[in-house]
Amino acid sequence: MCGIFGVVGLDPDRDRLEASAAALRHRGPDHVGFWIGREAALLHTRLSLVDLSADSHQPFWDASGRHALVFNGEIYNFRELRAELAAAGIACRTSGDTEVLLAMLLHAGVERTLPRLEGMFAFALYDTQTGALTAARDRFGMKPLVYHSDGNRLLFASEVKALRPWIGLEADLVALTSFLGGFQGPTTGPSLFKDVRHLPPGGVLTASPGRPPQVTQFATVADLWDLTERERLRGLSRRRLVDELEARLYASVRSQLMADAPVGVFCSGGVDSSVVVAMSSTLHANLAIFHADVEGRHSERSAAETLARHLKLDLRVAPVRDADFLDALPTVIAHSERPITIRPDSIPFFRVCTLVRAHGVKGVLSGEAADECFLGYQSMMPGMPGLGAFRRRMAGMGLRNLYRRLALGQHAEFEMFDERSDLSQAIGSRFEIELQEARHRGLRDRHGSPIRAEDRKTLDALGYHLRTLLHRNDTLGMAASIESRFPFLETGLVRLAVNLPHEFKIRRTLRPGDLRHPFYCDKWILRQVARRWVPRALSDRPKRAFPTNAFKRMRIAPAFFRDSCVAGLLALGAEERAFFSEHSRPLLQQRLLQAEVWALTCLCRATPDQVRERLHRHVTVTPDRGR
């Protein structure tokens, strides 16, 4: 919804504050608000979706003028919370969720309020009397928050680029080399930037004068594992389970259509977005739906058009061509603030977000997270890949990395390296994935035994893998000044998914179904819901990853790496630079290219246009021979 920034512990400078505002303006083009105090300042750039009036501009103050809030996101249950406040004699003068959030934090306290918030958020609450600051982020990490602290001062922001006017941005060389070695990049804790950290999903940061900030957790995904809920679900018939999921999803869609500005829906043609589009169409007149058409033999446009005709809706299409993967790459990486090898779909996603904004729509519902909740990736299905694919993968990586790729359901274009790099990769990633999986392995069933691997799949997928998706949706949606919303991440719905018996996600069937995993149905329960809303051709349609293979077909001339910024960061000598640029394997070359674009745009202050010109001089995309 917005961009937030704050500094505590030094006298603010108006010019630097305005530079931070300019860096976040794409996140909030409708209004910029400042507050400058003694040794503290707050900044907010607003994208107005709920209560469009100036009454909800931020920083937002309580009636006493003591407490200020800067808030990014949406609280979908704010009306229920406002009714509770009214019952307690606390009246709200605005019609939006910002005032309700501030009032609840002050009335009930941070600790009691946070678990009750249904929505996506990153916020900071500042007490001008004590100088104390509290910042928090939603359970799943739908909205970002990064921070820097040197013990005396604290800076926080929605994006790293807003910190640049206040601190020098440098590469975290451990994270950078870990990325080059196969890790996809940090999403919690340390970042790719030295001394800049991500507040973890469900994290709470507290700071007060003279003390370093402390980070605690108010919620994790693992908290949703609930043995009582699991037993309740086991006692329901198949029809009752389908009914409950349908009711929860419909209620979530209804609440997330809440807005005083135009809202639409992404329409990929897959089952997840199709059911969200269909439900939304019964709740929203003249619904706008949007599709990214990656042109070529794997285009999904026909499926999206089938749904649009069925629902009598106009489909707005953003064509995506090979050239877009070069043209958009510098802008996409500059906004993502990280390489996108794990997310080649970032290019078509950015293109469709630009189309959304061009049609005056500010918020868009998405089918994101359905695959994580209900196990929709091919790699999560029983059996192994086809023999040819298996041999090709075995040639590129070791067994353990193959398992990790399958377990996480990552559909990146590039393979990890062999198993000898596992330990160094884990150290370089600060054990981000390993620690997550260890926490899930520590959960117990009703007999006190560790929960089965198949029952951990949803929890694991809702960790690192989901965080990379949410980061893409937030940064690239905000790059186009639109907000992505996620009906499948309503807390009660995710609790149902986490505790739902495995056989209702991946289910044996007598029908051949998808030839990649015959006689098994993925996302079984969601497909049953979808059958009630969309044609069978869509509800039963096999899962398809975004049809992107342009990165695989890029040919990178060694001259692209001449005077390489990354080589300089790694302190490579002349001979090492030559090897770096001319003898790297194709997969490493792509990583080097993306790291170079990241370093140029995020560290070396090159403009996207400058990097784009360099790409066009030295990089080509060969034709797709399958077209």
Image: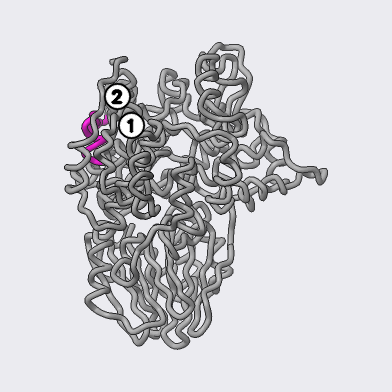
Residue 371: x %, y % from top left: 50, 34
Q: Is residue 135 left or right of residue 427?
A: left
Disc 1 crowd rating (10 Å Cα; few below 14, some 14-19, many 20+) is some
Q: Is residue 117 above or below residue 458?
A: below
Q: From the top left corner, tell me how far across and down residue 29 is, in percent.
A: 22, 60
Which residue matches tag 1? 551
Mark 2 surroundings: few (<14), some (14-19) or many (≥20) residues within 10 A? some
Q: Quadrant of residue 504?
A: top right
Residue 421 locus on image (x, y percent): 56, 40
| Residue 314 appears in the picture as rendered | no
Tell me, yes or no, whether the two marked residues, 2 and 1, touch with CB atoms within 8 Å.
Answer: no
What residue is shown with label 2?
301
Disc 1 is placed on an element classified as loop
Residue at position x 51%, y 29% in the image: 377
Quadrant containing the C terminus in the rendered view: top left
Q: Residue at x 60, y 27 (%)?
A: 506
Q: How is the image coloured?
A: one colour
Question: How many labels, in total?
Answer: 2
Q: Quadrant of residue 301?
A: top left
Q: What residue lies at 42% left-to-right and 25% top-to-bottom?
A: 544
Q: Which element type, helix, strand or loop, lies under badge 2?
A: helix
Q: Which residues are magenta?
A: 313-328
Residue 512, position as x, y percentages in the image: 55, 11
The picture quadrant where one finds residue 538 is top left
The residue shown at (59%, 19%) is: 520
Is residue 498 visible in the rendered structure shown here? yes
The amino acid at mark 1 is Phe
Name the quadrant of the N terminus. Answer: bottom left
Q: Is residue 101 above or below residue 26?
A: below
* Residue 67 drawn above or below residue 227: below
Task: Please say whether residue 22 is one of the residues in the magenta stretch.
Answer: no
Q: Amino acid at mark 2?
A: Arg
